[in-house]
Image (spheres, rainbow, N blue to C red):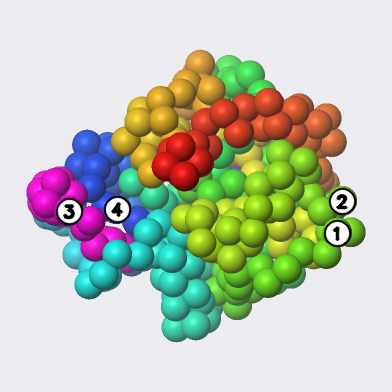
Amino acid sequence: MKKENFKVNVLFFIFNRPVHTETTLNELLKQKDYINQLFINVDYPCNKEDKMLQDKTIFAVNKILKRENFENVVWKKHSSKQGLAKSIVGLTNHYAAQYKNLSAVVIEDDCVPLPGFMNYMSYYLDKFKNDNSVYTVCGYQYKEDKIITDINNKPIVDVEKTERFNPWGWGFWPNKWKFEWIKSIPEEEFLKIPPSVSEFLKIKEFQTGEIDVWSTTVIHKQYTQGLQTIIPNISLIENIGFDGTGVHSEVTNVFTKDDIIKTDPIIIKRNSDISINKSREIETEKFLYDNLGKVMFNKKQKQK
């Protein structure tokens, strides 16, 4: 896929992890040719330790922005604790209301963009902007293919569709986006949602946002409304957050990739035959059903 001039805005969510934030922002700004404006969301610290770490995080961000001479930045610093879910829901809904025609990419502080990520996001956010059946574009693949290369040793990345939204590096269109917490789920809707997700959604707090999780709500919407995600067959995001520093999970390597893209890939664009990979859907569901409950949200569960 050739380089495009289409730029997008980036919503960057940080809190109290200076090392993660620095790693992610450094990699993101290596791809700044695709970034129009950077919105940085900073949640309110819970305690003195959070405040100290947050000050270090903000210092690191400002240092990188200055070094990269990137000035088109909007800061959103909260005056009360929001939590990740309310932060993302609040900023994405606000952005959708204010910036009708400017697509956005959402990056959390532990979702490191690999080479080609912003090129991929830019292209497909432009390509599918008028297709109302496509609701999001995501950059992480749970069950990826083995990396193959061309004769010049450049990685080749293909794309497909899925109804399974993934929150680790993703993009949306303001005119399509609307996040609403679930008031109730009829029994027949659970049949449309994979068991790896429906088991969480059967817990009322996941529907209403009382648990600090938002992505299951988007997954519910996509499956029940037949909305789709564009996704690569190889991850263009490396999640470095499963080291015990995150809000929802403890240490695990279940989402760690044995191999990652280290150089700009060739991203194959298919004009008419982008479809759902049914065999990968089955593999992904089995993988998540076996592993998701072991690692995701277990901190919250242990606190109860």
Judging by the rendered image, the residue that carries numbered circle 2 is 191
x and y percentages locating residue 210 in the rendered image: 51, 61
Spatial CA span between label 4 and label 2: 36 Å
Spatial CA span between label 2 and label 1: 7 Å
Judging by the rendered image, the residue that carries numbered circle 3 is 47
Segment tinted magenta in the rendering: 38-60
x and y percentages locating residue 76 in the rendered image: 27, 70
- Going by the numbered disc 1, the residue's amino acid type is Glu
Which residue is rendered at x = 53% and y = 63% of the image? 209
Between 25 and 281, the one lying in front of the other is: 281
x and y percentages locating residue 147 in the rendered image: 59, 21
Judging by the rendered image, the residue that carries numbered circle 1 is 187
- Going by the numbered disc 4, the residue's amino acid type is Ile
Q: Nearer the viewer, mark 3 or mark 4?
A: 3
Judging by the rendered image, the residue that carries numbered circle 4 is 14
- Going by the numbered disc 3, the residue's amino acid type is Asn
Along the polypeptide, which appears first: circle 3 or circle 4? Answer: 4
Which residue is rendered at x = 77% and y = 41% of the image? 195
Q: Secondary structure at mark 4?
A: strand
Q: Tell me, yes or no, whether the two marked residues, 2 and 1, touch with CB atoms within 8 Å.
A: yes
User: What is the crowding at mark 2: few (fewer than 14 residues within 10 Å), some, or many (at least 20)?
Assistant: few
- Going by the numbered disc 2, the residue's amino acid type is Leu
Which residue is rendered at x = 78% and y = 56% of the image? 223
Along the polypeptide, which appears first: circle 3 or circle 1? Answer: 3
